[in-house]
Image (cartoon, helix red, strand yellow):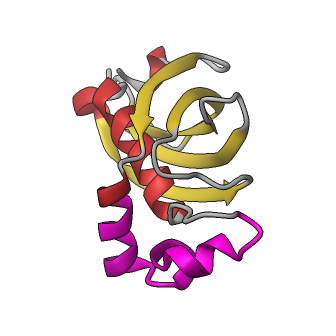
Amino acid sequence: MYFDDIRLNTVINIPPAVIDRQKMLDFAFEYDNIPLHTDEEYAKTSPFGALIAPGMMSFMAVWAKYLEVDLWGDELVAGKSSKVEWLAPVYAGDTLTGTATVTALTPRNKYNGTVEITITVKNQHGVTVLTNVTEAVVKRRTK
């Protein structure tokens, strides 16, 4: 989809992502090896009461589902920035669903523009667990 075809406040539903325990542990041991993510006994004594998924793993699980939608197709030039805020813990077995909303459109030049997408992710209980604001550079129709 070209930048010129994108509309502000468009909402895209993101397919559900299930947090698999083994994938969660594998990710944690490789990329975020702290006891809260890898040590069951330690995690039981934490305010969370159990192991929680690394924040980036939770985000990436939803991001992978967002990419399946392939909103921009071949018109995507590149990602520009991304900011994630973690608001509630994510546990093994949680099902995360999200929406992506077009929150800003900024023309850059005659070839492309920046699209800001705000992603809101909730667990199966309706609790917002994270938000993300991402900017992508998308091709414009050239005349």
Which residues are the magenta region?
24-48
The quadrant holding residue 42 is bottom right
Q: Quadrant of the C terminus?
A: top left
Q: Is residue 7 above or below residue 84?
A: above
Rendered-image quadrant of the N terminus: top left
Q: Is residue 88 magenta?
A: no
Q: Residue furthest left?
A: 74
Q: Residue at x 44, y 83 (%)?
A: 33
**Residue 70 visible within the image:** no
Image: 79 above or below 100: below
Which picture quadrant has residue 117? top right
Above or below, 69 against 65 in this view is above
Q: Nearer the viewer, residue 51 or 106?
A: 51
Residue 62: image location, x then y, percent: 44, 41
Say whether residue 91 is left or right of residue 17.
right
Question: Which is more toward the observer, 79 or 110?
Answer: 79
